[in-house]
Amino acid sequence: MADHAADGPAAHTNGQGDTSRPVTIAYIAESAGVSVPTVSKVINGKAGVSADTRARVEELVNRYRYRKPAGAGRSNVVELVFRELKDMWAVEIIRGVEQVARRHRAGLMVSRFGLHDATPTWEDTVSRRPNCVLSVAQLSETEREQLTAKGIPFVVVDPITELPDDVPFVGATNWSGGRAATRHLTQLGHRRIAMISGPEDQLCCCARLDGYRSAMQAARLPVDPELVVHAQLTREDGCVAGRSLLALPEPPTAIFAANDLQALGVYQAAREAGLRVPDDLSVVGFDDLPVVAWVDPPLTTVHQPLTEMAAAATELALTLGRGEAAPQVGLEIATTLTVRASTAPPKR
């Protein structure tokens, strides 16, 4: 068998001179009877593989003289993939990626498609061979395997689902943010504090809800089940949830929403009910989108450093794209509470 070429994968000979099938990570995985991510772990010297499996994979790697391409054939482009483009939220992420890509003289391509879109859409990304991929919110196992098989590094930005330990990601301290928001309200003297959480299957929303519960417990306040509702992360759904909370026989004096858009929906629900923010109802959001500093009244919210998260994720992805080891697989950037005019002590 010929040595592995510098600009592509080695070729597998079948003993009769047939070099038609290239030796890729996927081929080694098939030969060893393991998954592509397992082979990737072995090749990159990562933990999480049994000794027997590691030995079997290494034997095949040596037998076929496989050499990692180290970026061969990839373009100098960072591809940023959104599942949905949510206006202001997406702009903050794009800004962070663009800043770092420009500094490294790399191009930026923004794509949008969902997990359930037609397969060719995602395979278009793979066929473009970007230097690295930043996937916002989630990245399925199939997508990870496709990227790994092509030697394209990836990082998940602000993940909403649990990821395997070896998948690089950059997120925020959602639990601490939820706790800080609720503690602010308890320290103002509120006792009936409601929370509009996000979808129950989203990791970040669950963490914010857990932070709310932790702060309530620390203040020795019961968490009334009727004061916790789940809604989509939109202004419209926040308004619907706010109406239901404000229609209770004993409505809350404060509402913590899982994101700023929900909080703006609560503003509308309060207006409809003839209530003033913060005189009659305190409201706290999460994200700190630029617009919430200009609404009336300016919104108290948890600052999620979206631009900084995106910048850190881009630095990490470009490091992996150079074939260098990542300083750490997962990174959480601290949230901070931004207090404005939408919160005040409750009426006595």
Image (cartoon, rainbow, N blue to C red):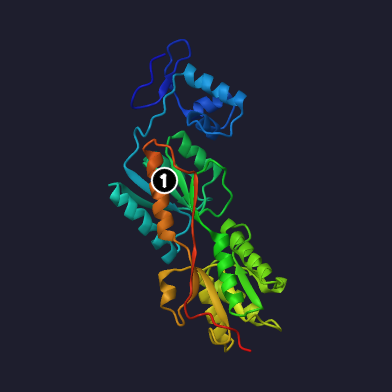
Residue at (59% x, 71% y) in the render: 183
Name the spot of residue 342 as percent of width and height, x first: 51, 80
Q: Quadrant of the N terminus?
A: top left
Asked which quadrant contains residue 207, the reply is bottom right
Q: Quadrant of the C terminus?
A: bottom right
- Residue labelled with disc 1: 316
Asked which quadrant contains residue 5, the reply is top left
Q: Residues within 10 Å of mark 1 (few under 14, many from 20)?
A: many
Asked which quadrant contains residue 184, the reply is bottom right
278 or 216, which is in the foreground? 216
Residue at (68% x, 68% y) in the render: 217
Residue at (47% x, 44% y) in the render: 328
Q: Is residue 32 above or below residue 152?
A: above
Name the spot of residue 28 as percent of width and height, x first: 51, 25
- Left or right: residue 258 versus residue 11 is right
| Viewer can see residue 109 | yes
Q: Is residue 261 above or below residue 27?
A: below
| Viewer can see residue 87 | no
Residue at (45% x, 79% y) in the render: 298
Q: Residue furthest top?
A: 16
Label 1 secondary element: helix
Name the spot of residue 92 as percent of width and height, x first: 40, 62
Disc 1 residue type (three-letter): Leu
Name the spot of residue 308 as percent of width and height, x first: 41, 57
**How many numbered circles does the render carry?**
1
124 or 154, which is in the foreground? 154
